[in-house]
Amino acid sequence: MASVLSNISNIIIPVLIFYIIAYGVVSKTNVYEDFVKGAKEGLKTVVGIMPTLVALMTAVGILRASGFLTFLGNLARPFSNRLGFPGELVPLAFIKMFSSSAATGLVLDIFKNYGTDSRIGLITSIMMSCTETIFYTMSVYFIAAKVTKTRYTLTGALLSTLAGIIASVVLAGMMYGG
């Protein structure tokens, strides 16, 4: 079964690309021109959001290098530990909202210090899958789509992240045996 799934996953992208091209040919559109036009628009979008990306990455780098994240984790540890969430993961939960790549660096540090099969390691792994880079995603997509009224997006995203963190703790507890 694993072999079949592996073969399917190896061919799914080429099949999808072939389908798109075939659909374009059958629809009598110039597939290449449409591709180049889309690539140009994509490049304009990248240039438009680049300052936001640089600002977010710089801010995360400063927070990490300054020791603020360690301070934040130590400050929240008594409260978070009572809730069953390890204080060592507070910086990760905070940074993940801004940058997935910076969070990955923290994940590697956590794995190095606690191991991948520890309770903290399991919570970390699940949390990385259950949470989103809220501020990055909002800034990139809202700037690209020129959205100015975000309504309840931030509230919903923060509640979803909280739900993901809670699910991480519960699932890791179930998997770790406690």
Image (cartoon, helix red, strand yellow):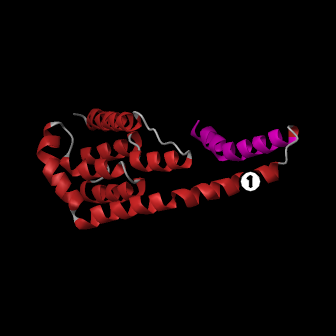
As for residue 14 lying within the magenta part, the answer is yes
Judging depth in this view, the residue of 143 and 35 nearest the camera is 143
Q: Position of residue 69 (x, y in %)?
A: 23, 57
**Horizontal side of residue 174 vs 72, given as left or right:** right
Kindly identify which residue carries mark 1: 37
Figure quadrant of residue 102? bottom left
Residue 32 x/y as whole percent: 81, 53
Q: Judge left or right: residue 16 versus residue 53.
A: right
Furthest-front residue in this view? 148
SS type, badge 1: helix
Residue 99 point in image, percent of width and height: 39, 54
Q: Position of residue 136 (x, y in %)?
A: 43, 50
Q: Residue at x 71, y 42 (%)?
A: 16
Question: Could you tell me which residue is drawn at 36 percent across and 46 percent down?
Answer: 125
Tell me the residue at 61%/43% (across/down): 6
Q: Amino acid at mark 1?
A: Lys
Q: Nearer the viewer, residue 130 or 11?
A: 130
Residue 118 appears in the figure: no
The residue drawn where x is 76% and y is 42% is 20
Please give the range of residues in magenta: 1-25
Report whether 6 appears left or right of 123: right
Q: Does residue 126 appear anywhere in the picture?
A: yes
Q: Nearer the viewer, residue 106 or 157?
A: 157
Decide: is 40 above or below 155: below
Query: From the viewer's perspective, is residue 174 above or below residue 58?
Result: above
